Amino acid sequence: MDKSFFGNRRFYEEVLIIGFPVALQNLLTTSAGMVDTIMIGTQGETAVAAVGICSLFSMLLFAAYFGFCNGGIIFFAQYWGAKDEQGICRAYGLTLVTMMIAGLIFGAAAVFAPEFIMGIYTNKENIRSTGVLYLQIVGWSYPLQVLAMAISSLLRSIEKVKIPLFASIASLITNTILNWILIFGMFGFPKMGVEGAAIGTVVSQVVHILVLYIYCFLDKHSFITRVRDHYRWDWPFIRHFFSKTFFVVCNETSYGIGQLLLNIIIGRQIEEGIAAFAVFRVLEGFIFAFFGGLANASAVMVGKRIGAGEHLEGYHDAKRFIAMVPMVTLLLVIIIIIFRNTILGLFGLGETAQFYARGMLYIYAVTGTIRTCNYMNNNIFRSGGESVFGAVIEFCGLYFISIPAAALCGLVFHLPFLAVFFMLFLDEFIRLGIILWYMNSGKWIKPVTGRGREGLAKFRKEMAAAGK
């Protein structure tokens, strides 16, 4: 380990400049979800559970398009490091088209088949009927969510991180005000409950898009408004793009389906456990808000250096991120645990549901720390151009370990709810050692730019000399 491993000033300055605004934006997005859950909590545990299950479908949408988004980030960051503007524009256009396909499909499913979707997730009729009311409205926001994510990902990758933050602030304010008005029927509006929360979500996404586009049209050098350049693809570029993104997409899609199966198992447990799980997902979102900022910073910083041919610097930055992430995650979970009674009291949960929520937080202090470490490793592999190794390891762990274990405990042996919850994370322990070994080897550095490929031989010699 070099002497500057923990004390490199340049590294931490870049983390703050790139990662902090993203973390704050993620925190605002999560806060919007928390506002929804707290306000809906006044409608009872059934409403909390129903909206929580709808959010699981939103997470499946996220998994469907985020593979293309993450694949695009590989190109955005490395082309940014190589100063290839045409490459950035073409990669954005192809990324947006592939992401939007997922957004339109999921939006149509939510709007036109909400009963079918809710029936997949739970067999509790009262939860299903409430969730249908929410889902068929909020589905209109899905294509808008995809567009906002595509624009924000490109802006972050080229180190323009403040604009997505401002857009999220505007969206959060809109969502909070409309939720208050429509859920509770203020200023003469009808009291709409979960339907009001859904309408607030749709309108806030419209505001989010408007703020992003206003900035992009005012910025003379914006890649977003160079529409003609977005679609100047040729076959070699398309083949190169999908050769790198294919396994990222497969990884995210298989992960989303795996989480769907796990959520189906959870949706057939005790009703208080389902409500507690919905609240846990909101609290987990706060942890991932900060973690997401670090993940984005790692993708930009490591990808930019590898794209520019500075492989050794990118390698050391990657290892610094891997050391930082578990400590940040554990600290955040401990803070939530310390204030657990106050926080959980905001959500309208009964005594039994609060017991389950507290238990999940204790378990997550260990499992969540390991999970974010594994996720960060896989994220860095992708930014370095390696999209296969992490995908295969995650697929095997999820489908051969966690899903069978959770199914046996929850559906066959009917073990206590918290035991079933622990099984959701069982594979993380096994994957950790394998992933850390691969990170240390440096074999994940596979540039997509010409400058990056030119410096690869020198890096391999340096790693061989270091015995790695």
Image (cartoon, rainbow, N blue to C red):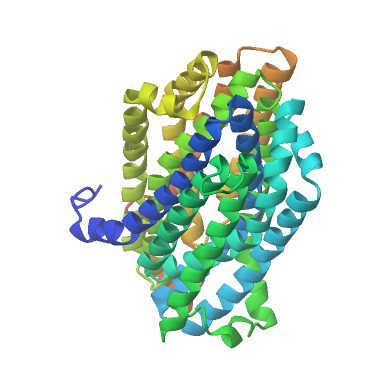
Whether residue 460 is visible to the viewer of this picture, yes or no, is: no
Whether residue 98 is visible to the viewer of this picture, yes or no, is: yes
Instruction: Count the labels in the image.
Output: 0
**Left or right of residue 269: residue 459:** left
> Would you place residue 434 above or below residue 362 in this image?
below
Question: At x 43% / y 71%, what residue is drawn?
Answer: 307
The percent coordinates of residue 298 (x first, y second) are 39, 56
Question: At x 54% / y 19%, what residue is drawn?
Answer: 353
> Would you place residue 238 above or below residue 123 in this image?
below
Question: At x 56% / y 73%, what residue is drawn?
Answer: 92
The percent coordinates of residue 113 (x first, y second) are 81, 47
Picture quarter containing residue 368? Answer: top left
**Left or right of residue 200: residue 342:** left
**Left or right of residue 149: residue 22:** left
Q: Nearer the viewer, residue 113 or 74?
A: 113
Q: Nearer the viewer, residue 428 or 424?
A: 424
> Would you place residue 119 above or below residue 377 in this image?
above
Question: At x 65% / y 51%, what residue is drawn?
Answer: 138
Q: Nearer the viewer, residue 153 or 88?
A: 153
Picture quarter containing residue 272? Answer: top right
The percent coordinates of residue 154 (x first, y second) are 48, 69
Q: Nearer the viewer, residue 374 or 173?
A: 173
Picture quarter containing residue 335? Answer: top left
